[in-house]
Image (cartoon, rainbow, N blue to C red):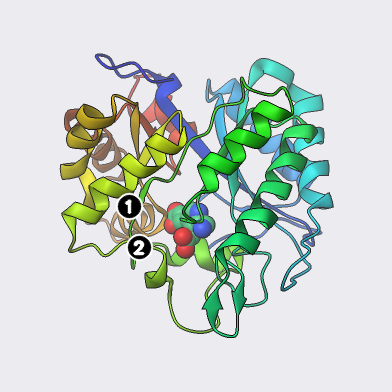
């Protein structure tokens, strides 16, 4: 998935939202054909995507129940199993590892008396990751920005004899205004404060670089910058220092802005998207997460 010199369809990763309570699939404002699927429609969508030659997915499960701790991820485990039962090794299924759509607070960590409880958060996330790996997921993508999470998940995977499951770390993730459509979809907007306590300040280059270095040292196999366009200046330096593959996530708000401009006939969506992908490649990204990945053949590869 991480070729350096060429750009292949294989280097794109398609996000997919699957919602537990959905009897029918709902649209998400700004995200075009990226719907909140029920499991059945999600599986059908994946089948169509595979026929379009799109093979890498990152799953965002949206479960019904919210808790303060002791999160139940039965639905997600069932979704992973069903998808893998249907498609086996025809696809590579990453899972986003976070608790922001599971917590009552909408935060990516457990709060106790308004303070982040990192040990408890690590424990909860690692337990969830273990369940996901038992359910057959191909790769784990910790997105919560909890220091130590990559180390804990790697330790757990090795102990479970699942050393070959890769970890794609959201290693440089900024507190950003571009996650709006995603948070609406994942029902994960924070109920108090914001995410600046654990996500990075866009003004600090130093902490942006050192965050990726820290997760690389914890044992991440792949690193990532997010949002993509506001982070392109960081990719090469992170690659040079860590010697690990670095990808860019073209996030929901970035994608939606192109969709909305296209709808107003101010730009051409396909051409603008291919320009963005080329920009990521020029900046040194070795893979790209994009809400348009499934249309890569049409957009970029002259299908
Ligand atoms: C979960 C998570 C988020 C995104 C990916 N994983 C939301 C957030 O950090 O608030 C955003 C992705 C997007 O906007 O496309 N923590």
Q: Which residue is drawn at 73% across and 22% down?
A: 87
Q: Where is residue 64 in the image (x, y as percent from the top left)?
A: 77, 66
Total of numbered circles in the picture?
A: 2
The verdict on label 2 being within 8 Å of ligand 1 is yes
2 or 1: tag closer to the N-terminus: 2
Asked whether the viewer can see residue 45, the reply is yes
Q: Is residue 94 visible?
A: no
Query: In the picture provided, is 134 more to the left or to the right than 251?
Result: right
- In the picture, residue 26 is in which quadrant? bottom right
Q: Residue 71 in the image: state x and y as whole percent.
A: 77, 61
Q: Name the residue under label 2.
A: 178
Q: Distance between the residues labelled 2 and 1?
A: 7 Å
Identify which residue, 16 or 94, lies in the foreground: 94
Pick the front one: 109 or 45: 109
x then y, percent, for residue 102: 68, 65
What secondary structure is marked by label 1? loop
* CB-based contact (under 8 Å), mark 2 and mark 1: yes
Q: In this view, does 80 lie to the left or right of 145?
A: right
Query: Which residue is label 1 attached to?
Result: 227
* Residue 37, image x, y percentages: 69, 51
Beta carbon of the mark 1 residue lies under 8 A of ligand 1 = yes
Label 1 packing within 10 angstroms: few (<14), some (14-19), many (20+): many
**Dot 2 crowding, Cα within 10 Å, few <14, some 14–19, many 20+:** many
């Amino acid at each position: 998935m991480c070729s350096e010199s060429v750009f292949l369809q294989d280097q794109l990763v398609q996000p997919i939202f699957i919602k537990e309570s959905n009897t029918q699939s709902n649209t998400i404002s700004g995200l075009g054909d990226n719907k909140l699927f029920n499991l059945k429609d999600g599986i059908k969508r994946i089948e169509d995507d595979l026929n379009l030659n799109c093979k890498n997915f990152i799953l965002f499960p949206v479960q019904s129940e919210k808790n303060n701790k002791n999160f139940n991820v039965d639905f997600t485990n069932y979704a992973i199993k069903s998808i893998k039962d249907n498609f086996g090794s025809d696809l590579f299924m990453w899972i986003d590892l976070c608790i922001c759509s599971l917590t009552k607070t909408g935060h990516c960590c457990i709060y106790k008396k308004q303070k982040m409880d990192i040990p408890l958060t690590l424990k909860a996330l690692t337990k969830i990751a273990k369940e996901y790996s038992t359910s057959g997921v191909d790769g784990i993508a910790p997105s919560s920005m909890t220091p130590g999470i990559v180390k804990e998940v790697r330790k757990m995977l090795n102990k479970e004899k699942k050393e070959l499951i890769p970890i794609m770390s959201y290693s440089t993730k900024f507190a950003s205004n571009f996650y709006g459509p995603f948070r609406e979809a994942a029902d994960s907007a924070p109920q108090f404060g914001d995410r600046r306590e654990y996500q990075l300040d866009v003004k600090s280059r130093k902490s942006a670089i050192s965050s990726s270095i820290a997760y690389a040292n914890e044992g991440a196999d792949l690193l990532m910058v997010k949002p993509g366009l506001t982070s392109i200046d960081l990719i090469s330096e992170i690659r040079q220092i860590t010697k690990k593959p670095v990808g860019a996530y073209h996030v929901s708000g970035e994608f939606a802005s192109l969709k909305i401009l296209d709808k107003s006939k101010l730009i051409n969506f396909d051409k603008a998207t291919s320009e963005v992908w080329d920009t990521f490649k020029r900046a040194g990204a070795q893979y790209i997460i994009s809400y348009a990945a499934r249309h890569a053949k049409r957009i970029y590869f002259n299908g």
